[in-house]
Amino acid sequence: MNISVIIPVYNAEKYVAQAVESALQFEEVYEVILIEDKSPDNALIICEELTQKYDRVKLFQHPDKGNHGASTSRNLGIEKSTGDFIAFLDADDYYLPNRFDAEKELFKDPKVEGVYGAMGVHFYSEKAKEQYYKVFRSSLTTVYKKYHPKDVFPGQLYLLGSFGMFSIVALTIRKDSLINKMHPFFRPNLKLHEDSEFLFRLSYYLDLYPGSIDKPVAQRGVHEENRITKVGINKKKPVLSRYIFWKHVNEWASKEKNMPENIKIHIKRMERSFEIAHTPNPKKWAMILKYLILDYPSIRSGLYNINFRNTII
């Protein structure tokens, strides 16, 4: 195996060296690609030092050397990668020694297009743990049991919280399968949950197999400056971000010719459910009335998701 590990770097001068070195511990890692995204701290200097220290580390910036976000940075990393397999790592996360154990066996089978595993949590400070323990706790981010690849996409869609979820940091993809079957890769206009939206579509197009789902293969680094943690404790923004997420998914699904109509309807109802939750009163009741007339199951599905599955994404 020769794996390209792609790391977008923004505001991570304290952590990026650890992330890079956690990837370099594996002989299967052919290259570590750093995409420096006009970080406001000294991350660029650290990245340059890492390229001088390690031959396998490559550094890129966007053509205009500007800030374009994680999605565009990961897309650039995919474009620059030369390995047969692609793995992702955030600059404040890190791999564990068992990161590619399952992959080395599973990818011997050519029909395996991707392998996902479990991700743990590491709090960088007591303050971070105190602030964000309720968001992440100490549990694994994982799919709860082994599913056939054809069940991964509908499992995420219909089973929701009981299915579990996997992180992009615990995912390895066969590059040819990604290039040939899925476009676009990450959506640049989606600033939150862009990785979840990517994984959702990926599981529709590619056959993804479970690797280590009961033990973590990577650690999510939680600190005071995490972008997602700041949103995670805000009760208003998560509803809006989930609505935007499902809006993008619905736009994609509506254009997918081979997708069964019942799945398209369910996705549309998911979008409507969070649209209703996000809409302020009294407009909310006008919207509920509209969907009561046009599509009553949207209300039934919407209220169910809003009240009982408010943290699925």
Image (cartoon, rainbow, N blue to C red):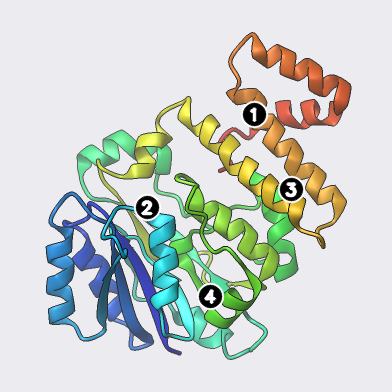
> What whole-number distance in Å separates the C-alpha atoms at marks 2 and 3?
30 Å
Quick check: 263 above or below 208? above
Q: Is residue 216 visible?
A: no
Q: Nearer the viewer, residue 163 or 51?
A: 51
The first of marks 2 and 1 along the sequence is 2
Which quadrant of the figure contains the C terminus? top right
Q: Amino acid at mark 1?
A: Glu
Q: Which residue is mark 1?
A: 275
Q: Which mark is residue 69?
A: 2
Q: Position of residue 18 (x, y in %)?
A: 22, 66
Q: Position of residue 225 (x, y in %)?
A: 25, 42
Quick check: 260 above or below 87? above
Residue at the location (52% across, 36% down)? Answer: 241
Mark 4–mark 1 CB contact (< 8 Å): no
SS class, disc 3: helix
Q: Nearer the viewer, mark 3 or mark 4?
A: 4
Q: Which mark is residue 173?
A: 4
Residue at the location (45% across, 50% down)? Answer: 139
Quick check: 85 above or below 17? below
Q: Which residue is mark 3?
A: 158
Mark 2–mark 1 CB contact (< 8 Å): no
Q: Is residue 180 visible?
A: yes
The first of marks 4 and 1 along the sequence is 4
SS class, disc 4: strand
Q: Amino acid at mark 2?
A: Gly
> What whole-number distance in Å separates the C-alpha atoms at marks 3 and 4?
24 Å
Judge the density around disc 2: few (<14), some (14-19), many (≥20) Cα neighbours within 10 Å. Answer: some
Image quadrant in which you'd find residue 136: top left
SS class, disc 1: helix
